Amino acid sequence: MLPIQQTIQFSDYSDLYDLIIPKDNLLRKINDLIDFSFIYKELNDKYCQDNGRMAESPVKMFKYLLLKTIYDLSDVDVVERSRYDMSFKYFLGMTPEDTDLINPSSLCKFRKLRLKDKDLLNLLISETVRLAIEKGVIKSKTIIVDATHTGARSNPWSPVEMLKQRSKQLRKSLYDVDDTVKGSLPQKNEDDDLSHELDYTKRLLDVLDGNKELANVPVVRERLNMLKEVLSDIEDHYITSKDADARLGHKSEDDSFFGYKTHIAISDERIITAATVTSGEKGDGPQLPELVEQSRNNGMEVETVVGDAAYSGKDNIKLSRDENNGFELVARLNPCIANGCRREEDKFDFNKDAGMFVCPAGHMAIRRAVQGKKNQGKNQSMVYFFDVEKCKTCSRREGCYKDGAKSKSYAVQIKSDQHRQQEEFQQTDRFREKARTRYKIEAKNAELKNNLGYCRATSYGLDCMRMQGAITIFVANVKRILKLL
């Protein structure tokens, strides 16, 4: 049950915050910038209003999730740090002397029960874009679009590799504190047998259980808790932990990944104005209409869209020339990109990184060839050939593959009328000038992955991936707004 109104805590020691926490502290600036009451209003219907025990404030729980993302901490460590870190206490609305902490398991329940079925991704982006417009940060009428990939939690790292990585991080922190501890640690497991690695991990934890002084050093304790978290998850899920929603995607013709894609749009000021999360095999181009619509719904005026060749398909070119909702599309034409569909429900997506089409089942073409002659009054076609052995056993072969056929191909026209008009536009100085701004979204993708841990999913399933994306993008946008202000 939630109280009718949020409570304000008073303390005789609150003045300590002004002495200890500088004005330029990141958490202080975030607290001063954002009114988090929108979280309370959004999640109010997730709590019983007149029955049960008094619940923790949803604003406070949401702030814990922000702290986890900003500082890359486990549930246990983010709660423990709020015990002694005054900037954490200030951010969470605690009094300086407050030692009544939440149970770390409450964060897991909050994610699963309170945030379930909420469009958190669009809500948080909308709130930050509204704030950016209100503060005069967003002035441009251009969005830049691209996709970034995130590896699934269960792959390509196997449970053994995850344990080895966390054990390695723990050992490194131990050696930094006391390198004489090497002789007391158990011998590392050198094979890829999960049972052997689990035995080694438990023996390593037993050693630290017997050395409380070393285990309580903050840097060691953080790594120790991360290892325990992974161990607990693997013991519960390592047989059934394969991520059912993740899919195989391609970064190039020879390089693939298993996981998800986040398709994002940013303004010229590098504020993320829209995002969608899909499984890894989805093409970039089909997401453009939703990114444009979301950006406009969030308050952004969109007159120009900048993207790479994946966004120059006929559907997107046609959309850009719509009388009511059109925009200037700055996407370099790739002659191999077309609508790519025979039936509306069976679209073949073009993967611009690999230069190949991907069928609805997620299988990529293995080779391509040009068909037809130049200057013969007809458009040439690019024919893509698929692995027929996969087609024979594909669950979606009906209506796509004819039994007994020795090959499976897919052809697209190299040029259409829409493509010819786009080709004329890309020869102009205006196109070249706007195309130079595309580097900004590459830098934004790098920030999400390298600084905010978005290179790896922290949980399983598309819903959890959307939640992770929502928190990560919210933090990225808030930090960017603060920098611009």
Image: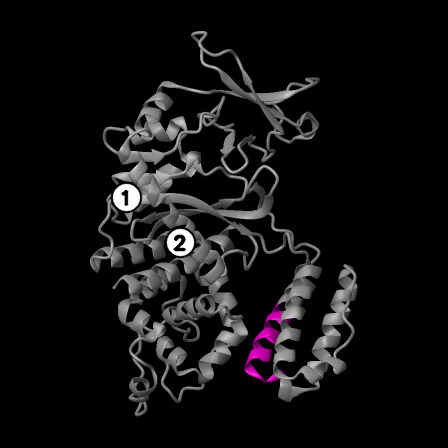
Residue 5, x across and y down, in percent: 29, 73
Assess disc 2: are there few (<14), some (14-19) or many (≥20) residues with their C-alpha within 10 Å of its C-alpha.
many
Residue 351, x across and y down, in percent: 51, 35
Residue 37 is left or right of residue 466, and the answer is left
Of 451 and 40, nearer the camera is 451
The residue identified by callout 1 is: 142
Residue 225 is left or right of residue 55, and the answer is right
> What residue sits 45% from the left and 25% below the top?
335
Instruction: Say above or below: 158 vs 249.
Output: below
The residue identified by callout 2 is: 121
Q: Is residue 405 visible?
A: yes
Residue 363, x across and y down, in percent: 61, 33
Instruction: Say above or below: 36 vs 179.
Output: above
Q: Is residue 50 visible?
A: no
Of 80 and 313, nearer the camera is 313
The mark found on residue 252 in the picture is: none
Of 423 and 135, nearer the camera is 423
| Highlighted range, magenta | 215-229
Kindly give the residue lying farthest to the bottom in the view shown.
Answer: 12
* Callout 1 amino acid: Thr
Local SS, label 2: helix
Local SS, label 1: strand
Instruction: Say above or below: 56 vs 405.
Output: below
